[in-house]
Structures are given as C-alpha cells and as structure tokens.
Image (cartoon, rainbow, N blue to C red):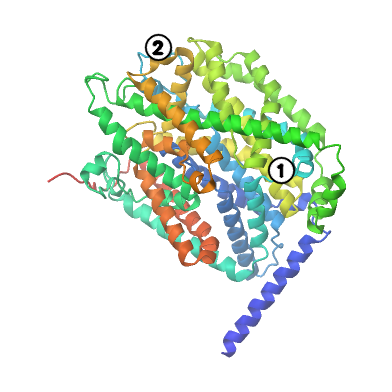
Amino acid sequence: MSMEEVNDKKENQRENLEELNEETEGSRTIQPWTKQITVRGVIVSILIGTIYSVIAMKLNLTTGMVPHFNVSAALLAFIFIRTWTKVVQKAGFIPKPFTRQENTMIQTCAVACYSIAVGGGFASYLLGLNRKTYELSGVDTEGNAAYAVKEPGFGWMTAFLFLVCFVGLFVLIPLRKVMIVDLKLTYPSGLATGVLINGFHSQGNKSAKKQVRGFLKYFSASFLWGFFQWFFSGKDGCGFQQFPTFGLQAWKQTFYFDFSLTYVGAGMICSHLVNLSLLFGAVLSYGLMWPLINRLKGDWFSEDLQESSMKSLYGYKVFVSVALILGDGLYNFIKIMCFTLFNIHGRLRNKNRNTADEDDQKKTAEDLKENEVFIRETIPMWIGLVGYIVFSIISIIVIPIMFPQLKWYYVVVAYILAPSLAFCNAYGAGLTDMNMAYNYGKVALFVLAALTGKENGVVAGLAGCGLIKSVVSVACILMQDFKTAHYTLTSPRAMFVSQAIGTAIGCVTAPLSFFLFYKAFDVGNPYGEFKAPYALIYRNMAILSVQGFSALPQHCLQLCYGFFAFAVAVNLVRDFSPHKIGKWMPLPMAMAVPFLVGAYFAIDMCLGTLVVFVWQKLNRKEADLIVPAVASGLIRGEGLWILPASILALAKINPPICMKFLPS
C-alpha cells in the first residue's frame, strides 16, 4: 500500500504541475510567435505528414475515400513530443516545455502536408490525363482525343502543385480577422481540433497514457498483420485480400472481407451514416443492378466488347457514379451558396442595430483573450496581396506552358474569380463544415472543357479543375486552421508559417508518395487493387462536357437521370423532413464510390463502425477517449508496411506463397 500511495502522490504532483503550466499558457505571457515554431516540431510535422501522405495516397488510389486525419495528427503530435521530452529527460537534459501552441503548429503543418496527397489530383484530374485512363475511356470515343494525354512526371507535377497551392495560401489572408473574429464563423472541424488539443494539455497523464498505450498496441498489431499477409500474396488475386468470406458467389460480386485494417480504422473515424451509405450503395449496385444489367449483355450492349469498354457494363458503372456525385454536389453547392448569401444578407441588415455592445457583454474573459491574441499577432495585408499577385503572374506564364490546351486568358479569368470563390467556400465551410472545393473544381471542369471544344477540351477541363479546386481548398483549410489557432491561443503568424512549411513539404512528398505506388504497382487497373476510380470519372466528365450524351452506352442516360434525381431527392428529404426521418437518408456521394469500386471496402468500414457502436454502448466515455488512438494505430501500422512492401515490389522480390480459393 505504501508504494501505491507514493505512486499516487507522484501522479498528483505531475498533474498539478501540468495544471500550473496550463495556467501559464492561458495567461498574458504567451510565447512570441517565433518561439511557437520549434525545430523538433518541424521534424515531427515532416514525419507525421510524410507517413500520412503515403497512407492517404493508398486510400486515394484504391477507393478514393479518405477520412479526415486532423484529430489523429493532433494526437500523434502529442504522443511524439511527449515521448521526445521523456527521452531527453532520461538523457539528463532539461527539455523545452511542450505547449498547446506547439501542438497546434505541428498538427497544422502535418495536415497541410498530407492534404496535398489527398486533394492534389493524383487519383483524379491529374491521373486522368495519363494514357491508361485514355484507353479505359475508349480510344474510339468521340471527344477522347489520342493527343489529350500527359503522362505523370515528378517535375511538372511538383511545379504545378507549388503554383496552385501557394496561390490559395495567400488569397484570404486579408479577410482573416473578418471571418474569425467579426463574423464569428465556427468552422466545426477547426474548433473540434482546438478543443481536442486543449484537452490533451489539461486532462492529465493518466488519460494520455491510455491513449499512447492504445495507439502503440494497435499500431504494432496492424504493422505485423500487414507483414504476415504479404507472404500469401504471391500473384494477382492471391492472399487474404481475396478471402471469400461469404462464399465464392458473393466473392465474384466483390462481397467479402479483405482483412484491411486500414479501412477498419477508417470506418472507426468516419460517421455511422457514411459507412452505412457505402454499404447501401454496394448492395444496390453489385448486389442488384450490375448482375441484372450483365444479364442483358447482347441486348443493351454487345457481347463482343471488352469488360473495360465504356460501351459495356463498365460504362454504366462509371456514368451512374458520375450522376450520383453530380446530383449530390450540385444540390449541396446551391444549398451552401444560398445559405451563405442569406446569412450575409441577415448580417448586413442587422449591422446598424445596436448589437455590438450586447455581443461584447456576452463574451467571456476567455473569448476576449482569444480575440486579443488573434488580433495582436496580425499578418500584414501586403503579404497576402503581394503573395497572391506574384504567384498568380507566375502561374499565368507557366501553366499554359505545362498545358498548352489551357490558354493563358482562361488562367487570368480563373485567378480573377478565385478570391470570390475562395471566400464563398470558406464562408460556407465556416457555417456547415463542408469544404465544397471539389464541386467548384467540377464546375470549372465543365465550363472550361465546353468552352475549349473537342480538340483541347479534355486537357483544359482537367487542368482548370485542378487550378480552381486547389486554390479554393487550400484557402479553406487555412481558415479552419486559423480557427484552431484562435481557440488554442496560437499566433496566426506561427500558424501561417506552419501552413506554408507543410504545403511546401507536401508539394514534394505527395508526388514522391504517388510514384512510390505508380512505379511499384499497376495503378489504374480496374480489376486490380489500385483502381484509382476517380481518374476515370473525371476524364469522362470532361468527355461528357465536350461530346454530350452520345458518349453514354444504351439506356445509360435514363439511369443517370434517375440517379441524379435520387441524389437530389434524398438531400431534400434529409434537409426538410423531421429529424427522425432525415437522419436515415443515405449520402449519395458516399454511395457512388462502391458503384464503381466494389463492396469489399464498405464491409471493412462497416466492421469499424460496428466496433465503435458496440464500444460506445458498453463504455461511451472510454470509447470517446480511446477510439481515435486505436483507429490511428490501425491506419498507421498497415500504412507504414506499405513502404517496405513497395521497396520489395520495386526490387522484384515477390511473396513466396499464393493463397487462392477455387470451387471444388
């Protein structure tokens, strides 16, 4: 008992010390912004950002579904630096205190880094330019010109990313105070990350140790499981990834559990609604529609066509997915725009009313402190203006050289419109937490492809999509991070520099991560592991823009009309029906992915959501604390195994065993 009392006393002393440190951080003597950015923080940011770039690239190139890793990145930053300080202490040195501001800086830098891998177009508009995607779209398809091809290259991809991403970094800097302090936009994801980081630095060592143990345990298990699986995957179609869990007939329709702990972890992070929408889409497509349409071979489409032809069953899969994505995207685009305009109108109408004093009276001391720190550490407006103008001018010169089909005057118009588009998107995200950058990009794709015409429309549309999407997305992510900085009393200057460092690193690590897979595996094969479904979807959107509906196989247009209307109707029911009905409506954007990819990953993710559901029923408090750590461990463990697996593949070292299942 005496030993336990001593341990308890030491634990209480440590927690009291943490509380004292927390009070110091909350006082007016916050460190200057130059000291909030540390060398160890940058090193940890690069490590976390690089590994998540590889993981995000794998998810992008397999299914295109990538969950948000913001919470996971903040947790790992906390774990790494805490481990770092303990190692330094044991070595006999006095480490620099680990503050919430440094934690915020690391999280921001890491997220900015891997966000390039998620949204840089490596599995969508940039990959859609390569020859394999051109061939899959149909070499005889009108509008799909043979010269509308640009093979991936590290040099031009890196240069393109540097230009379009850094333009987005500067575009909304002058509106930083207006959106965070004056308009009081919530940015739910940014606020949630800030709450989480504050919690890490105030919850005490006991909870932190639980999270660290949970992460390390499942990280190790996931890595070893990936290593074990490798031995049985000697050839295509072999291994646990092709295990016929529900029988061979179900396996032929892609209904099986592929033992991917990465997607189980992703399912634990994603909401129940997202995971169930994936499963519903899988059942509707591969369980019902595609087997029925396949029986009509010879009637709806020729029996002589290859399975990968856009005039065969594969064409129905692609264009019905496009219809669902466009229906959902267009509805939400219009909804967010209307919501934004009505909100701005309401604020302007109430501007002259005497509400400022009332708002100030409602503010707590903590709110006033947050505003004071955020305004005091101002970023000069000229930095935003000069940065935007310089990078825009360079882009107007360089991008038409990279893509001659995209004329310079289209780039000029795009950058004239970009600030207003970025503001609308960032404002909408501040209200609804929905980053609609992909939808802005799709609008640009359709407009530019249609304006440019059949000769150059595909390349111009895909390149223009990347330009607008990247600018709008990076600006929105920066504003979310400013909200996190506002809540954690982190200097906006430190936040901006961290974002710039992370973006610069991401513009290099993302292409490297892409080529790690592109050189080692058969990326873009519709029947392989790395299907890259969105590359084909985006190219066919561009073809549809320049060619019209003649690109569709027989009766596909009617199906597309139906699913477009279904996507709009489901959203209307969710928004305007009672909550007890609306909460059960599926998400069309999530449903669209298994229509093209298959059902296997939806089963993995539903297993993850089932684990979380049961855990929350048994012990909700423990689940809320440990689930992010467990999910992060599962994702990172198997994700880290990708690196040695890719090196072995590049070295032509194949697994020794092929485990395959055949009918008796």
User: In front here: 491 or 507?
Assistant: 491
Query: In this image, 203 relative to 374: left or right?
Result: left
Amino acid type at mark 1: Leu
Circle 2: residue type? Glu
Q: Is residue 482 left or right of residue 75?
A: right
Q: Can the viewer see residue 475 in this picture? A: no
Q: Earlier in the sequence, mark 2 or mark 1?
A: 2
Residue highlighted by disc 2: 142
533 vs 202, left or right, is left
User: Vertically, is 439 above or below 185?
Assistant: above
**Figure check: 578 above or below 77:** above
**Residue at 58%, 60% in the rendered image:** 79
- Where is mark 1, residue-wise? 185
Residue 278, percent from left and from top: 41, 42
Q: Secondary structure at mark 2?
A: loop
Q: Nearer the viewer, mark 2 or mark 1?
A: 1
Q: Position of residue 392 (x, y in %)?
A: 69, 23
Taking the view exactly as shown, the residue that stands out farthest to the left is 664
| Residue 638, percent from left and from top | 42, 51
- Front residue of 94/367: it is 367
> Which structural element holds mark 1?
loop
State the residue lying farthest toward the bottom.
2
Q: CA distance from mark 2 to mark 1?
A: 47 Å
Image quadrant holding the N terminus, namely bottom right
Identify the residue at horizontal 67%, vertical 25% (top origin).
418
Residue closer to the observer: 352 or 109: 352
Q: Position of residue 483 (x, y in %)?
A: 70, 46
Q: Is residue 190 visible?
A: yes
